[in-house]
Every structure is written in C-alpha cells, then in structure tokens.
Amino acid sequence: MTELVLDLFRVNNLTVTWGDRLVAHLGLTSARWQILGAIVAADRPQPVAWLARDLGANRQNVQRIVNDLARDGFVRFEPNPHHRRAQLVVMTDKGQQAFDAAIRLYNPGINALAERLPIEDIKAAVRVVKVLRGYFEEGENAEEQV
C-alpha cells in the first residue's frame, strides 16, 4: 500500500508538470486548467467554496487561483443572490476559449496513453483510486492512517 501511495504522489507530480507544459502557452497552469474544468463541469455558476469542495482542494488556494484567473480575464465574478459575500465565478469567453484549446491539446496525448493500457487495467485503477478517494474524503486523519 505504501508503494502505491508513493507512486501516486510521484504520478501526481509528473501529471501536474505535464499539464503545466501542455497549457503554458495558453496562459494556464494545471491548477488554473483544473479550476476552469470545475467551472465547466458545474451545472451553474458556483462560489469559490463550492468549486474548492468539488475539487477536494483548499478554499484559500482556489480563491487565490480564481483571483488570478479573474485578473487575467479568464473568469469574472457575479453577484450571488443567495449570499452577498460569496460571489459566483463565471467563465468568460477568453476562459472558455483557453479551456477548449487545452482540451484539444490534451485529447491526443491522453488517447495515446489509453491505447497503451488494456481497458481492464484502466477500470481496475479507477476502482482503486475511487476507494482511496472515498477513504480520504471520509475525513480520516492522515496521521492515524500511518
């Protein structure tokens, strides 16, 4: 299990580096791209706290990145009719174009990778990752797990 966790850390770092290189010329990083993806995936505009929850990320980190995205014109803030201080994050045309361009760059690479693995292995990996995700999302204290 420890070997798996250590490899997941390594793969995460390599994936972030790959993503950063892939979308850098679009004015994005992996973190920015991930947040734009969460905005696209939501069925309606969300406040930062909800985006952070959906990503399993720290709200303050997501807020910082969203502020940077807003400064650079990829997203904008709109009033939230349900909460005065928690503005809604909305994708701009520039943000949608950057996200779409990132996906066009991503698809060939991910499809090539998928061709290297049997579908059964991909499905097994997804099942294992979902179990790990569920375990950690249950709020277990990481120190108690060691």
Image (cartoon, rainbow, N blue to C red):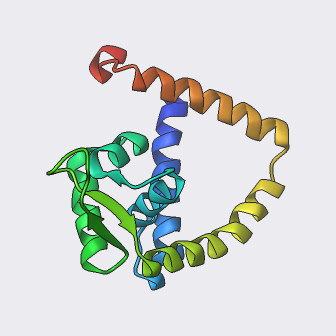
Answer above or below: position of 76 versus 56: below
Which of the image's four quarters has the C terminus? top left
The image quadrant of residue 53 is top left
Q: In which quarter of the view is residue 138 placed?
A: top left
Please say if 73 is above or below 122: below
x, y percent for residue 86: 20, 50
Horizontal and vertical percent for residue 45?
40, 55
Query: Would residue 113 be found to the left or right of residue 22 on screen?
Result: right
Residue at the spot x=37%, y=75% of the render?
A: 74
Measured from the top left, where is residue 144 in percent x and y? Answer: 30, 14
- Relative to 130, is 84 on the left or the right? left
Locate residue 104, reporting x and y percent. 66, 75
Nearer to me, 112 or 53: 53
The residue depicted at 53 percent of the width and 49 percent of the height is: 11
**Farthest residue in the bottom direction?**
25
Total marks shown come to 0
Q: Quick check: 17 left or right of 145? A: right
Work out which residue is located at the far left of the displayed protein and give it.
Answer: 85
**Residue pictured at 75% horizontal, 35% vertical:** 123
Residue found farthest to the front = 81
